[in-house]
Amino acid sequence: MSGTCAGATFTVTVTVNPRATIANKTATICSGAAFSITPVNGGAEIVPGGTTYTWTAPVLAPAASITGGSAQGTGQASISQTLTNTTNAVATATYTVTPMSGTCAGATFTVTVTVNPRATIANKLPQSAAERLSLLHRSMAGQR
């Protein structure tokens, strides 16, 4: 309305896109394996269809204990990488993830991946004939 003159009616359509709300996630893998996290809608989590994820390079504990982790700046359908634990102890990689639904960024959440080391046993063979005979004797003694 302008003064006392009424204009033509018109419709305004407003689209309200939901913002992703995702709780922190965890995964446990063996060294050299891949993890994959794909949040799903439901419960306290809001995951609009088509949500993609970007993430920072992981924070490693202990430092420099894991290889294969890197930042991802292009939106992905899931959070996934192959990680290798270079130590003989359990290590973790913690990613900070940003969900994107259309042009709406949701609150960041973390993905903490526990990477168990692979067991390694040194191949030790007896060095001398005497050591080999001793091993054979002990082996045969156990069969009696």
Image: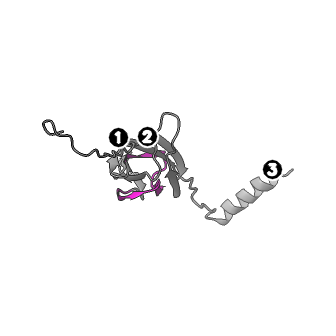
- Single out the residue that lies furthest toward the top: 44
Kindly report which numbered mark, 3 or 1, lies closer to the viewer in this rendering.
Answer: 1
Residue 113 in percent (x, y) is at 47, 46
Residue 91 in percent (x, y) is at 45, 46
The residue to which callout 1 is attached is 107
Other-residue count near label 3 (Cα within 10 Å), few / some / many at <14 / 14–19 / ≥20:
few
Rounded to the nearest angstrom, the CA distance separating label 2 from label 3 is 58 Å
Kind of residue indicated by mark 1 = Ala
> Which residues fall within the magenta stretch?
70-99
Which numbered disc, 1 or 2, marks the residue that appears first in the sequence? Answer: 2
User: In the structure shown, which secondary structural element does the residue marked by tag 2 occupy?
Assistant: loop
Is 66 colored magenta in this rendering? no
* Circle number at residue 22: 2
Kind of residue indicated by mark 2 = Ile
* Circle number at residue 126: none
Rounded to the nearest angstrom, the CA distance separating label 1 from label 2 is 8 Å
Residue 47 left/right relative to 72: right
Question: In terms of image quadrants, where is residue 120?
Answer: bottom right
The residue to which callout 3 is attached is 142
Q: In front here: 135 or 12?
A: 12
Which numbered disc, 2 or 3, marks the residue that appears first in the sequence? Answer: 2
User: In the structure shown, which secondary structural element does the residue marked by tag 1 occupy?
Assistant: loop
Q: In front here: 3 or 93?
A: 3
